[in-house]
Image (spheres, helix red, strand yellow):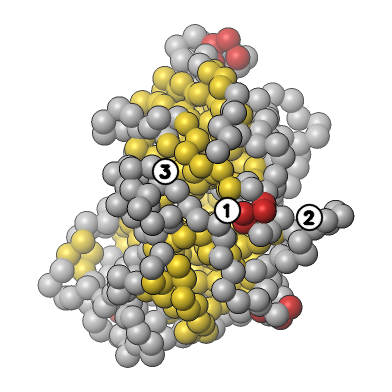
Amino acid sequence: MHHAVLMMTQVTSLDAAQPGSSGNMSPELVSNRNTNITRAFPYAIQTPARFSNSDSSELPDPRTLFQDGLKITGSLSAPVTSNPFQPSLPPPISDAAEVDMSLELCTHTAPKRPYQFTTQLIEAFKLKPRAALTCVLEESNSEVSVAYGMDGTVQLWSPQERRMLQKLDSTALDMDFAEHITQVMPSLLVAVSGERTKPGSRRNPGQLMYLNQATGATRTPRLQNAQQLHTLSDSELVSVAEGMMGARTHDDCALMVTGGMRDRKVYVWEVKTAAGRVTAAEKRQLVRTRHTSRISALCFEPVHNYVLSGSDSGRVNIGCAETGREITSDNGERVSTQVVGKLAVCPINPNLVLASMGTTSDQVRLFDIRSRLSIQRPALILGLQRGRTQSRYLRPAWHPHGDLIFYPFLRGSAETGGDGMVAIWDVRYQRCAEDAPQVFHPHKADVWSVSFVESRTAGRHAMVTVSNDHCIGFTDFQL
């Protein structure tokens, strides 16, 4: 296998690279002079919170959720009904179980600011990248980063060794490029195929391609060539897929959720494997929604058994993965008038969901899903005023500690100094929506995605980014 990659080491010395730096290796704070950010609401989620098997009527009254200074408590359960298919999703937690899910928003007087950023850039792509996600493959002792781009490659990287383990090209993938990749089970990734309008294109967008882990690949994880189990019709084409890794399944079975490109439908699928190959993949549950445009984002929340979906028209919907019943109590409004780019549950609080929006401002919305989105008023809105609508393909991320949000921004045509920018918000800080976010520049061109892996330093996390400079970046920092 060809491993000729150009190694470039960049120590992000911000005192040299960024104007106004004080020379202490800390990222600069951008001026808030040109921002237009909706103010935050004092909001906190108290602990302990008790899960129950009672009806969803115990959910707090959404009309009172956002009063100033209100402390939110109450039942967090989804309605309990029989499961229409096997294998089953995890049952609701019993009345006796208490889970610590504290995440106070806008309560701390000082923000947490990461510092001492050191970035290593490695040339990885020939064309614009899409994203990099963190996976733990079967029997692997460490995490791997799966990076993919419009050059038609899917790459496995070792974040600890900072080297490429494997590269699959468009021939091995049997598609022009991967539009979206998700992990469905420890030995299986699923890719949604994209399409380039050029001579020689495979013309198969919106198909599900299965990337099985190669058998016996334990010390050095490897993927097999893509497997296409079925051909979706034009009305069934998929725009996005998301693994349901928190769902309880049999060893050879997994669940995933897909969003429709043209039929605008959300389905839960059952995927079965044997001898390292997918043997069956079937739709098992339609999740009812009110989407009227292409599904652009999906997220599975395993504690409540909720499927969250976002669309090009700016609507966010909540449905029960177990029964397909719509949970959203919709008043006809939308979260935004622009596309929903990504949905992500807070890693330490299953009630708190991040929605990124393809807008010129207010790009980050945080919601308490216990409100069922019946009031389309987020608990917190963050963002920067930009001279360019931010892309639906941007992939922000929660830090694993659940208090910081890392958001990559695209530079507008009339803006300067914004190349490769990642903004950082501490959602616990009282003035996180008023004050400018902390920013740093791991790349010299626009960054498309942010993800986190365990750092080579015990107890810390490193950040993985991909950028228009065709590089994958590994950034170590301290908190």
How far apart are labels 2 and 3 at the CA level?
28 Å
Q: Is residue 446 visible?
A: no
The N terminus sits in image quarter: top right
For numbered disc 2, what is the local secondary structure? loop
Nearest the viewer among 377 and 78 is: 78
Q: Earlier in the sequence, mark 2 or mark 1?
A: 2
Q: Position of residue 82 (x, y in %)?
A: 32, 90
Which residue is farthest right?
Answer: 199
Q: Position of residue 338 (x, y in %)?
A: 69, 59
Nearest the viewer among 63 and 391 is: 391
Q: Is residue 8 above or below residue 193?
A: above
Nearest the viewer among 223 and 359 is: 223
For numbered disc 3, what is the local secondary structure? strand
Q: Residue at x 55, y 26 (%)?
A: 121
Q: Nearer the viewer, mark 3 or mark 1?
A: 3
Q: Which residue is mark 3?
A: 144
Q: Which residue is mark 2?
A: 196
Q: Nearer the viewer, mark 2 or mark 1?
A: 2
How far apart are labels 3 and 1 at the CA level?
25 Å
Q: Residue at x 40, y 46 (%)?
A: 221
Amino acid type, residue under disc 2 in the picture:
Arg
How far apart are labels 2 and 1 at the CA level?
25 Å
Q: Which residue is mark 1?
A: 356
For numbered disc 1, what is the local secondary structure? strand
The C terminus sits in image quarter: top left
Q: Earlier in the sequence, mark 2 or mark 3?
A: 3
